[in-house]
Amino acid sequence: MRHCQAVVIGGGCGGLAAAAKLKQEGLSDVVLIERDIELGGVLNQCIHNGFGLTTFKEQLSGPAFAERYEREAVAVGVEIKLGTMVTHMSGDRVIEYVSQEEGYQKLKADIIVLAVGCYERSRGALGIPGERPAGVYTAGQAQRYLNIDGYMVGKRVFILGSGDIGLIMARRMSLEGAEVLGVAELMPYSNGLPRNMKQCLDDFGIPLYLSHTVTNIYGRDRLERIELTKVDDKRQLIKGSEMYFDVDTLLLSVGLIPENTLAEEAGIEMDPSIRGPIVDENYMTSVPGIFACGNGLHVHDLADFVTKQAGEAAVGAARYYEALKQRIKEAHDDEAETFGLSPDDDKESLASNSYCEAHAGNMVSYVVPAKLHKKSLPKAVTLYFRVRKPMNDVTIEILKGSKLLRTIHKDVVIPSEMEQVVIAGKHLEEADGDLTIQIKEN
């Protein structure tokens, strides 16, 4: 069985950024495994622009954005395995994979970075009553059919959910000649970015039905009609508010879920609020040597933030790797082994009393990372979180125990935009107690 220093699972922009950064941090043997036949992940079907504004200060299409990171990974010498499916991952960092070229193989890694992305919530998860005709797709499915395979999925379209993929597909279908009759959103506010609301709905005159949901689907062979019903502030259906639309296509943009089959198989502790792994400031999960980042950790609104966090995870993984090697060397009074580091060697740092927890306080839905070491933190720690509802004129408070570390005023916060706060590691170490991020409306 082959050993290597690091394996990155997932060849989207997050996996590419993590793999390249690991090489830049000094790891010589980095393997990137991607199940598709090309790198880039979902960005290959995102042919619209708007990517790279934060990272590169220019507008790029999805494929062009991914290509920047692919070129970087190739340039630094990352070993890339395409068309390769990871079938199993154990807690002792043994990966089983299959490919046409190699068949079935096992690979032992000192560190693993999960950059596995996310998947769309389907109609089955919603339980919409009615028939099961053709013409009901997730927004991502329709995007792939149209942008990669060249198939027009319908001519009269309605979209359920105001997530960014749904908004972008409303514009895309309109540009291809389809009639988009509307977008419905269960919540009383949109779940898409403001720029997508403006560019994809307002600019094309597509109506948005807030506090509405699809309550029935009609049609046996092909979708013919949908029923749309208004909901109250408790999300209960309002009788008598039904509307009907004659359509041949319904696109679902009703949420993304981190893909964590491998993480669960390895026994990694999961956070139910994000449906991804619980990680520390190095982005290490509860299983030593296994790290997580990107949309497989928690769903991001921008690909730029995915690659930023992937780079942070790679730095954290390299930091952990070097510290663990040093501890082994000191304990054995000998040169540390390059390969075969054991999770047992890191029991001290994984002891429960070496962590403090990061909690989501008032009007905050989650905080990542959810755990922080009490000592030896990096110079700066980035905390990611989302608010529970749109609010104006608020103060973000970061507390450690009873000590207020930092306050930030924001004119507007919305659930669709992920918030980031950077705190100095020394400030976190100086205060006692758990960390809490909360929102106060002014």
Image (cartoon, rainbow, N blue to C red):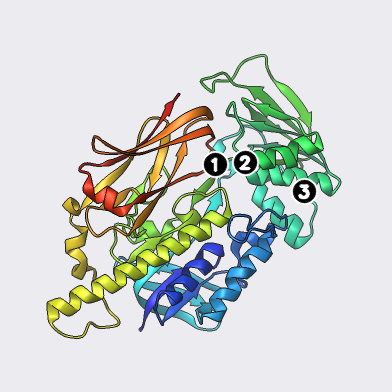
Evaluate whether residue 385 shows in this view: yes
Residue at x 69% of width, y 27% of height: 209
> Which of marks 1 and 2 precedes in the sequence?
2
Determine the residue located farthest toward the right in the rendered image: 177
Q: Residue tagged by mark 3?
A: 172
Nearer to us in this view, 136 or 373: 373
Determine the residue located farthest toward the top in the rendered image: 240
Q: Helix, strand, or loop for circle 1? A: loop
Nearer to us in this view, 43 or 247: 43
Quarter that holds the N terminus: bottom left
Whether tag 2 and tag 1 are in contact, CB under 8 A, the answer is yes
Q: Helix, strand, or loop for circle 3? A: helix
Residue 417 is tagged as 1
Task: Provide residue 323's location: percent of width, then percent of height.
Answer: 26, 71
Task: Provide residue 301's location: percent of width, then percent of height.
Answer: 56, 48
Please, what is the three-letter code of the amino acid marked with disc 2?
Leu
Task: Provide residue 49's location: percent of width, then percent of height.
Answer: 71, 55
Find the distance from the CA under tag 1 to the CA under tag 3: 22 Å
